[in-house]
Amino acid sequence: MSLSPPSEKHRFPPTELLDMRKPGVAAHWESLQPPPNSALIALAHRMGIAGIFSSSSTSTTTKSGRVKTVDDEQMALLIRQACTHDSFARRHAAMYPNESPPPTNGMLASLGNTLLGLFTVEFIHASYPHLPTRVLKAATAAYVGHQSCANVAQELGIAPLVRWHRQPSSTMKQAVTYADAMASVPRALTALIYHHRSLSVARKFVHTFFLSRLVDLRGLIKFRDPKLALSFTVEQLGRERPISRLLRESGRGTNTPIYVVGIFSGVDKLGEGFGSSLKMAEYRAAEDALQRLYLTRVPSELVALPTTAFPAPLPKERKSVYDFSEESNSQPIEPYEPFAFPSFGPTASPDKATTTTIGHSEILYGINDSKDVNVVEDLKRPWWRPAPRDPVTKPPAKWVLDKRALRERKKERAIEEGRPQALMGKTMRQKRRLGRILKGRTRRTRI
């Protein structure tokens, strides 16, 4: 494959610059010029993907004596497409309406975004099996979100090579920002690696540039009532009821007391917290116990990713640092058992402790769902009271319906007889409403 001869728009000086009556033509023409192939090839070598996009190469010698390969030209064309945002096509068409628009990274960025989410979610879920769903989404955004992709592109030196246009395509759409254009480049590169090599090579690329960064997950986990969540979780795991115990204290009776409280389930300490009051220390201890459970991490040598189950491609020549073969010892010999508290009681065996799941606890307290009746009722319930076995949405019993009907009959009888003392248990709004009804009936009777 060879490049087409340069067109008139790449000759210098172009005919557009000869007309000095148009202000800003020089800057506009400069923004439409493609980046040099040397900068694109240098970017590929800097990222370690220089030989990924082709399988064979043909070398030619230029007049200056430099050896030039067809692979370099193909790689430059692909990386130039990855660095061209979808908004650039409109600007190019406005300047050169008779020429075909350059290829952009619109579809590549969409595919790369899906691949980034796939690799990140499976990595986080395999490393932290108890992480709540909302925290998993927030961690995924922290690893491969919009701003994270823009930061990776900035660190790789892609900023001088990006071509984009700020003006939106219509008034209903927002303007394209610089961060949008930068974030699309790593996504497009991931899609190109997946298309030209394999899924494993694309996963290795994502793990190298994105998932190797450290993200503090403790700040992403928030609890509305950690004591209630811990009580429900321990109950689901079949452990004893959590009990708070004062471990240490200092400065009682002064302006700056310090209390250290631990939460125990039987003889095992689940968490520990401190504070200037017993209530604050107990709150932090319950929060620490839940974070210890949710942030239990699987050892890196035991993490098994679901995408490794796909069949490996045919052996190819090793052309980049991301072409690797799946080692036989990379898979765990025995399946990893997630962390869980051992259960006690008559069903538990003395030799081996049994484990239970905590999915229901995640549904109730790992999300912020205030519309579910069961969630609202569980949040109102004290942490020391066991949860009811039947859901709140079940139909009321017959004696409850009879009691409600009797209350309504008494209210109607009091209104008919004009006895305001029977309405003393009502709110002020109900008293005023019923008072107006009584006055209206009295007036009708006098007339």
Image: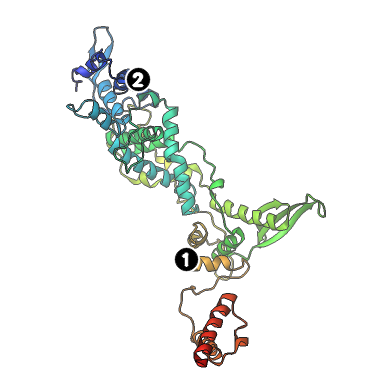
Residue 306 image position (x, y, % from top left): 38, 47
In this rendered view, identify the residue nearer to me: 320 or 41: 41
Whether residue 261 sits left or right of residue 379 in the image: it is: right
Label 2: how many Cα within 10 Å (few below 14, some 14–19, many 20+):
some
Residue 192 image position (x, y, % from top left): 30, 34
- The label nearer to you, 1 versus 2, is 1
Residue 425 in view here: yes
In this rendered view, identify the residue nearer to me: 229 or 15: 15
Label 1: how many Cα within 10 Å (few below 14, some 14–19, many 20+):
few
Above/below status of 66 relative to 313: above
Q: Secondary structure at mark 2?
A: helix
Q: Secondary structure at mark 1?
A: loop
Residue picked out by circle 2? 39
Residue picked out by circle 1? 372
Q: Locate the N terminus and report the quarter of the image it occupies.
A: top left
Q: How is the image coloured?
A: rainbow
Q: Amino acid at mark 1?
A: Asp
Residue 317 image position (x, y, % from top left): 29, 28
In this rendered view, identify the residue nearer to me: 19 or 365: 19
The image quadrant of residue 322 is: top left
